[in-house]
Image (cartoon, rainbow, N blue to C red):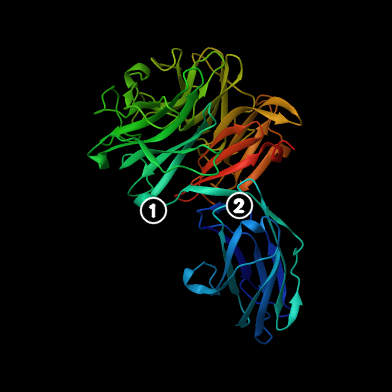
Amino acid sequence: MKYFFLLITVSYSLFSMAQNSPTSGKILSEVIMPVNPILKEGNNNPVVQLKIAVPADGANISLNSIEAEFISGNESIEKLELYYTGNNRSFSKDSLVKFIQPKNKSFQIPVAISLKPGVHYFWMHGLLSDKADLDKKISFRLNSFTASGKKIQPLKHESINIQYPGIAIRKAWDDSVHTYRIPGIITTGKGTLIAVYDIRYRHSGDLPANIDVGMNRSVDGGKTWEPMKIIMDMGPPHENNGIGDPAVLYDPATKKIWVAALWSKGNNSIRDSRPGLSPDSSGQFVLVSSDDDGLTWSEPYNITSQVKNPKWHLYFNGPGNGIVMQNGTLVFPSQYWDESKKPGMPHSSIIYSEDNGKTWKSGIGAKSNTTEAQVVETTPGTLMLNMRDNRGKYRSVATTTDMGKTWVEHHTSSGALIDPVCMASFIKGRVNVKGSLKEVLFFSNVNSQTARINMSLRASVDAGESWPEDLKLLIDERPGYGYSALTLIDENTIGILYEGIRDLYFVRIPVTDILK
């Protein structure tokens, strides 16, 4: 059984969550539709918000019932629970009023609650069936409520909230783990989805800490997921021997999956790494691989001496995804912290292998003060690097035609894609566009210059030369940790794996929803 939330808020004002009751003698109300998926395994899935103003100069009113309907997806709903939290906006499990099992699309929730002048809050907490279809959107409308025998239609009651179903593939305290972070995801040649991430056992903080790399497989396009496996663990003492920030790629030539991550022996992560190649002086660039579609994994393989300049403080991958170029070259985005004053100036770059992963080489930095990056091959031999920029407000973008020996800043850099200084995802896919297969770039991030909110998906149909506003889709407006990873599931479907607060969420997005 899987939860979602319907939030019903009784408030003072027609247009805002004011803290003073109106004095007109009229009951005022408004419906607000939040934007977020409804998640199997999730415990925070608002569907609609209702604001009602109880007049300050009137008598108590009696809330008799709430009337609503599912336009579609009602067969996924198993149970609805109504909570009343008085004048406290925060949800509380202790405030359950009743539950219902709606048998029809339209339903009524009968209640008998006396409401004094002032603010009152109600939540409806629901359960999704285990068999809920992740490809069928859920559409909901709150039509009216009845107070003191009078039916009231709130402002914007005609609005319909259309929400994607999804799944929380990892939640805080699953397997006694405090936090899951830093997603990466790819689709193998067999159509298997491989999701990787940090297992942050004790707290949500970065390395150095007790962190391993975890992995989940899905053989049905992300609709169900196999249990977690730990694929990178550097052994004891675990509190000072963590590994994390994974990136994943699939090589169709060898059918091998590669995962790269940063190993921090002792305190050798970003803050404390020093020049040198030894694990005792600097964080290490480490790989593992799988030859059997993610069922089993190799022992960790350290490539630090192949790719790191000994003068630099630190060198490791950009988390998320790597790619395979048309000529078969494997490429991971990377970042190095140079020889300037500790911890060094960061530079986004790439590492690459021209022999299917036997040996690796490094490019130079594309731009100073950039870190977590993602890479695509826009045309044969041309790589585009999309970078987190510590200057803030925008993503930086650069291209190379010589495997990172030289870089040219792209005209969309520092202007086309807003960003609050966070990781983002960037992939190329051959997708169905109005009946024809076309190459499209997809980009996901928290679409804000100031906060990690508004997880969004964007598309470029001209190899990253432009990012039209009409090819943008808001997926989740709520605050989160902000990292995301995209994969092409098939020519009609994009998968996005992204961070909530300590959780990892997966949603299937039809290509037609963004390429309208």
Q: Position of residue 21 (x, y in %)?
A: 65, 77
Mark 1 or 2 closer to N-term?
A: 2
Q: Residue at x 74, y 65 (%)?
A: 157
* In the image, residue 106 above or below residue 62: above
Query: Please, what secondary structure does the residue beneath circle 2 have?
Result: loop
Q: Are marks 1 and 2 in contact (CB under 8 Å)?
A: no
Question: What kind of residue is marked 1?
Answer: Trp
Looking at the rendered image, the disc whose residue lies closer to the viewer, 1 or 2, is 1
Q: Would residue 100 be seen by someone viewing this image from the given angle?
A: yes
Q: Position of residue 100 (x, y in %)?
A: 60, 70
| Nearer-the-camera pick, 37 or 12 | 37
* In the image, residue 115 above or below residue 99: below
Q: Position of residue 360 (x, y in %)?
A: 40, 16
Outermost residue toward the bottom? 59
- Callout 1 environment at 10 Å: few (<14), some (14 to 19), or many (20+)? some
User: Which quarter shows the C terminus?
Assistant: top right
C-alpha separation, residue under disc 1 versus residue under disc 2: 22 Å
The quadrant holding residue 407 is: top right
Which disc, if any, is residue 36?
Answer: 2
Query: Please, what secondary structure does the residue beneath circle 1 have?
Result: loop
- Callout 2 environment at 10 Å: few (<14), some (14 to 19), or many (20+)? many
Q: Position of residue 30 (x, y in %)?
A: 71, 67
Q: Residue at x 42, y 29 (%)?
A: 259
| Nearer-the-camera pick, 344 or 130 | 130
- Callout count: 2
Reading the image, the residue beneath label 1 is 173
The quadrant holding residue 359 is: top left
In the image, taking residue 244 as reference, residue 74 lies left or right, namely right
Question: What kind of residue is marked 2?
Answer: Asn
Which disc, if any, is residue 118?
Answer: none
* In the image, residue 95 above or below residue 240: below
